[in-house]
């Protein structure tokens, strides 16, 4: 089984009646703290979209308000948005990808500088891993494992 399948199974089996602090999974997105607000939000949203596609069971069921209006499901585990410098982001991604039970999504810098997806893929293919700069790293996994990885990183402000 892949990490994605393992995490998907945990998400599928989870109950939505627990506090996010009691949920078996923890989801964080860590953003480069030097990014201006618009680019930081873009990095967080793009990373979250990739997590949502890969792990759809992280989303709770749709709900209706008191007037009957439908509201699409949101992540039942919540998602903390944290800040780190570029070097910490790179090291965090390295540590996280080495863990068997952590699902990692990243946003390398060329993803934000290219306006053509195929161009981004070409830039990515032409850049060695160690030379990439990450703007965001999303992590999903067992609560204790993610907590150990992100340690005392502050909330993005």
Image (cartoon, grey):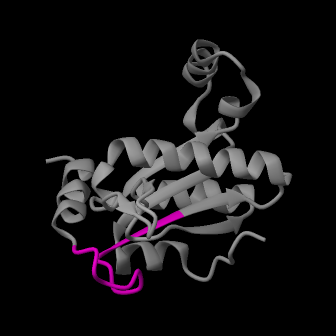
Q: Quadrant of residue 26?
A: bottom left
Residue in the picture at 37% in, 85% down: 19
Answer left or right for 56 relative to 31: left
Residue in the picture at 61% in, 53% down: 90
Q: Nearer the viewer, residue 91 or 156?
A: 156
Q: Residue furthest front?
A: 67
Q: Quadrant of residue 60?
A: bottom left
Main secondary-structure element of the magenta-colored stretch = loop
Tell me where the magenta segment starts and ends, as one range: 15-28
Q: Is residue 58 above or below residue 78?
A: above
Question: Within the magenta stretch, is there residue 62?
Answer: no
Q: Please say whether residue 35 is visible from this viewpoint.
A: no
Residue 153 placement (x, y as % from top left): 64, 76
Question: Within the magenta stretch, is there residue 21?
Answer: yes
Residue 72 placement (x, y as % from top left): 42, 53
Q: Quadrant of residue 110?
A: top right
Q: Is residue 82 above or below residue 47?
A: below
């Amino acid at each position: 089984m892949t990490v994605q399948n393992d995490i998907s199974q945990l998400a599928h089996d989870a109950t939505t009646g627990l506090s996010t602090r009691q949920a078996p999974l923890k989801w964080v997105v860590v953003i480069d703290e030097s990014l201006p607000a618009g680019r930081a939000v873009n990095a967080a949203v793009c990373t979250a979209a990739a997590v949502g596609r890969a792990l759809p069971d992280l989303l709770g069921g749709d709900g209706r308000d008191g007037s009957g209006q439908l509201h699409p499901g949101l992540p039942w585990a919540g998602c903390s948005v944290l800040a780190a410098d570029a070097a910490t982001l790179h090291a965090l991604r390295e540590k996280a990808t080495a863990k068997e039970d952590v699902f990692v999504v990243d946003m390398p810098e060329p993803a934000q500088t290219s306006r053509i997806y195929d161009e981004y893929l070409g830039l990515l293919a032409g850049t060695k891993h160690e030379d990439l700069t990450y703007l965001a790293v999303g992590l999903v996994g067992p609560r204790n494992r993610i907590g150990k990885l992100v340690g005392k990183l502050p909330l993005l402000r």
